């Protein structure tokens, strides 16, 4: 499972051509690369600078470049921790290829994944049943519409409203708990399948 998830992230990085992110000389922003980063979920962010100029300045520049990329990714709402490492100057002076930030997936977590009960497959299966992400309460965009409809279904089933957030125990957030509301799409399907012999009210979900 851990290996498959890493491979998925690496494939996303490759498809977006977001690694490495190139910078101009003595600059720590790269607006042209911004759109390539906004849909990605990286783990390690390594900043670099070309070798001309003061070493201390180049180390700081490589850090600011890495932080710039991290800022873009955090703005997307991604929940994975970002490990920022400034490497300073590398290679030959005036080598534009070294004015960069590398965004790569950390493979170290694969060796400890067995102790982490969070299941990616469980979470994704929840999406197959029609449940939205619960990492955050979306206020706009497609996810907001899906969450609004889902919340209405939860309420109609007489269940407690969804608590959104990154630190809840829900399998649709970052936890492992399967909650009564996670069965509402099945509850709705049963009502439709058995109508008119049995109405929706004849089926219930217990808490």
Image (tube, rainbow, N blue to C red):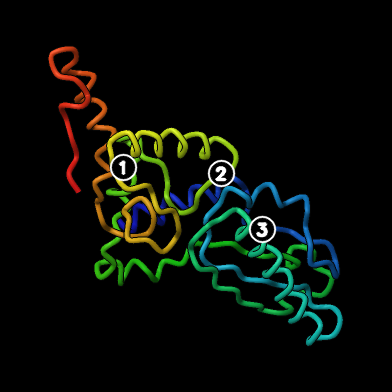
The quadrant in which residue 115 appears is: bottom left
Q: Position of residue 127 (x, y in %)?
A: 35, 39
**Do the CB atoms of the residues marked 1 and 3 lie less than 8 Å apart?**
no
Residue depicted at 36% across the width and 39% down the height = 131
Q: Nearer the viewer, residue 36 or 165?
A: 165
Residue neighbourhood size for the residue with mark 1, other residues' Cα within 10 Å, grouped as few (<14), some (14–19), many (≥20)? some
Q: Secondary structure at mark 2?
A: helix
Labels 1, 3: front one: 1
Residue 74 position within the rendered picture, expressed as x and y whole percent measured from the top left = 60, 60
**Along the line of sight, the residue nearer the viewer: 118 or 153:** 153
Res 59 quadrant in image: bottom right
Instruction: Please state the total of marks drawn on the protein image.
Output: 3
Task: Report how far apart the C-alphas of labels 1 and 3 lie in the structure.
Answer: 28 Å
Residue for badge 2: 15
SS class, disc 1: helix
The disc at residue 145 is none
The correct choice, above or below, for 54 with respect to 36 in the image is: below
Residue 126: which disc? 1
Q: Position of residue 50 (x, y in %)?
A: 78, 73
Q: The N terminus is located in which quarter?
A: bottom left
Residue sitting at x 31%, y 71%: 111
Return the residue at label 3: 72
* Secondary element at image label 3: helix
Q: Residue furthest top?
A: 196
Q: Pointer 3: residues within 10 angstroms few (<14), some, or many (20+)?
A: some
User: Which residue lies at the image location 41% right of the left edge and 41% below the top edge?
Assistant: 132
The answer to whether marks 1 and 2 mark residues whose Cβ atoms lie closer than 8 Å is no
Q: CA distance from mark 3 to mark 2?
A: 18 Å
- Precedes in sequence: disc 3 or disc 2: 2
The mark that comes first in sequence, 1 or 2, is 2
In terms of depth relative to the viewer, which is nearer, 36 or 135? 135
At 25% from the left edge and 50% from the top edge, which residue is drawn?
A: 179
């Amino acid at each position: 499972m851990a290996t498959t998830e890493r491979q998925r992230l690496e494939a996303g990085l490759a498809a977006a051509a977001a690694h490495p992110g190139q910078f101009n000389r003595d600059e720590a922003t790269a607006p042209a690369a911004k759109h390539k980063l906004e849909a990605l979920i990286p783990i390690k962010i390594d900043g670099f600078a070309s070798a001309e100029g003061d070493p201390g300045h180049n180390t700081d520049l490589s850090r600011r470049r890495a932080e710039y990329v991290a800022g873009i990714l955090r703005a997307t709402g991604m929940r994975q921790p970002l490990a920022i490492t400034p490497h300073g100057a590398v290679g030959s002076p005036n080598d534009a290829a070294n004015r960069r930030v590398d965004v790569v997936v950390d493979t170290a977590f694969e060796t400890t994944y067995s102790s982490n009960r969070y299941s990616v497959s469980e979470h994704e299966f929840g999406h197959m049943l029609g449940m939205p992400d619960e990492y955050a309460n979306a206020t706009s965009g497609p996810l907001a519409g899906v969450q609004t409809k889902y919340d209405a279904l939860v309420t109609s089933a007489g269940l407690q409203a969804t608590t959104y957030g990154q630190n809840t125990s829900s399998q649709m957030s970052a936890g492992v708990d399967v909650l009564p509301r996670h069965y509402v799409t099945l509850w709705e399907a049963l009502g439709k399948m058995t109508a008119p012999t049995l109405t929706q009210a004849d089926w219930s979900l217990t808490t």
